[in-house]
Image (cartoon, helix red, strand yellow):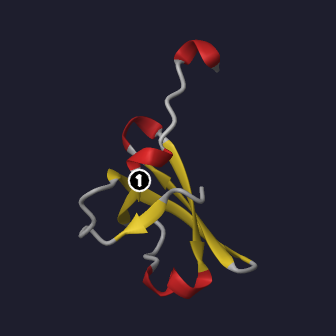
Amino acid sequence: PESIHLLDGTESALNVLPAILRSAVFEGDAVFLEGEAQDGIVLRARIPVAQSNRIPAAGSEVLLGWRPETSVIVSENSV
């Protein structure tokens, strides 16, 4: 979750997936987001409270993204 960020659409060097925001939960110094992308893929992100003023309501379409160097590929056979 620490590598996934809520995007505003201006970032171009990131891997990006559109998702529907399922929930946003405040917990301590962060907001934990859960979004559902195409085919039911669930993505979770941890957003610092200082950046939480731009979190949309549940049910909104959002862009979630991460830097390519933080990506990890897991084969189906290793799950």
- Picture quadrant of residue 11: bottom left
SS label for mark 1: loop
- Picture quadrant of residue 49: bottom right
Place of residue 35 in the rendered image (x, y in percent of width and height, measured from the top left): 49, 55
Place of residue 25 in the rendered image (x, y in percent of width and height, measured from the top left): 65, 71
Q: Residue at x 59, y 60 (%)?
A: 2
Q: Considering depth in this image, is 26 or 72 the residue closer to the camera?
A: 72
Q: Residue at x 40, y 56 (%)?
A: 65
Q: Residues within 10 Å of mark 1 (few under 14, many from 20)?
A: few
Q: How many marks?
A: 1
Q: Amino acid at mark 1?
A: Arg
Query: In the image, is residue 44 above or below residue 47?
Result: above
Q: Residue at x 47, y 41 (%)?
A: 71
Q: Which quarter of the rendering shows the N terminus?
A: bottom right
Q: Considering depth in this image, is 20 or 43 the residue closer to the camera?
A: 43
Place of residue 75 in the rendered image (x, y in percent of width and height, measured from the top left): 52, 19
Query: In the image, is residue 57 above or below residue 36?
Result: below
Asked whether, in this view, residue 3 is left or right of residue 11, the answer is right
Direction right: furthest residue: 28
Q: Considering depth in this image, is 78 or 67 the residue closer to the camera?
A: 67
- Picture quadrant of residue 47: bottom right
Place of residue 60 in the rendered image (x, y in percent of width and height, measured from the top left): 38, 67
- Quickly name the residue at label 1: 67
Q: Which quarter of the rendering shows the C terminus?
A: top right
Direction front: furthest residue: 69
